[in-house]
Image: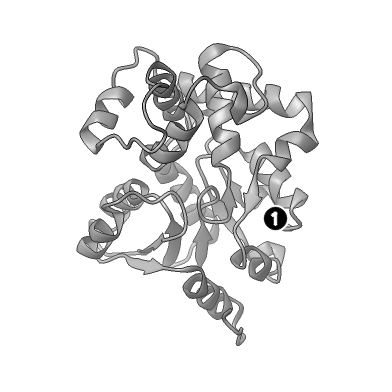
Amino acid sequence: MLIFDFDGVLLNSVVEMSITAYNAVTGGLATSPDDLPGNAAALFVTNRYHVQPAGDAINLMAWCVENAGLPGGHRMGPAEYRAIRDSSDVPLKERTVRFFAARKRLVARDPVEWASLNTVYQPVWDELKGVDAEGIVILTNKNREATVTLCHHFGLAVRPENVYAGDHGATKIENLEAIQARFRRERYGFVDDSIGNLEELDAYFNAGEPCLELMLASWGYIGPDDHKLARRSGYAILDQSGLIARIASMKGVEMESP
């Protein structure tokens, strides 16, 4: 059974996420990267790959605002990011609620404009549109409403019950346990662009008898050391044609790679 992450694998949401994170930090209602000060938006895009749970985007954006005078391509190291992430007095679940509330305000202002801040990754998106909706299972730190809305907006017929999301601070470990309880498969494959997510799932689910094949999507929010880390851990590194081949295998039919 093949399971998909959403942001960074199927959807490029980094612009929308930067604006939402800024609104969560400030309590405002920015609608464009141009509304952010200095190079804050560019710094967020550069360092987005560090973020795992959505609530941690608030910490990153607070740093981006404070350092908006730095070049937009400035990349912080893992230890620096961890220090920023862990410095908040606000619990992660509370930050996650704040982040999703800021997104809800942005959507309410203009749903069409909000959707336009996102783009889908091609050609894998169009190939996935050929899969029966029952076979598409998404495991994401995004909130379910936004995930389903964007899937349908861009023509992917995802069933809401097949989206295992980050609402109420639910983790990918918790959601994958729910997937196991529902589908009862012996083996699962999961593709994500976050090496941190893959490592956490690997440590939890493959400590004994391995049940989870982990794959790194090379076109998402990738850090400079992620390929090396993936190879060291034995994770497959996929380009889009590689994922399309996996989708073809899942469908049980031949599919021509682009």
Give the residue drawn at x 42%, y 34%. Answer: 72
Count of marks, rendered view? 1
**Colour scheme in use:** one colour
The one nearer the camera, 130 or 161, is 130
Q: In this rendering, would 218 be left or right of 168?
A: left
Q: Quadrant of the C terminus?
A: bottom right
Q: Secondary structure at mark 1?
A: loop
The one nearer the camera, 220 or 148, is 220
Give the residue drawn at x 47%, y 21%. Answer: 95
Give the residue drawn at x 47%, y 34%. Answer: 42
Give the residue drawn at x 55%, y 50%. Answer: 6
x and y percent of residue 110 in the render?
79, 29
Q: Can the viewer see residue 52? A: no
Q: Which residue is mark 1?
A: 158
x and y percent of residue 86 in the render?
29, 23
Q: Can the viewer see residue 46? A: yes
Q: In this rendering, would 81 be left or right of 113?
A: left
Q: Local crowd at mark 1 within 10 Å, few (<14), some, or many (≥20)? A: many
x and y percent of residue 173 in the render?
40, 45
- Where 7 falls versus 112 (above or below)? below
Looking at the rendering, which quadrant does residue 17 occupy? top right
Residue type at numbered disc 1: Val
x and y percent of residue 26 in the render?
54, 13
Q: In this rendering, would 36 be left or right of 150?
A: left
Looking at the rendering, which quadrant does residue 99 occupy? top right
- Where 193 falls versus 149 (above or below)? below
Residue positioned most to the bottom = 254
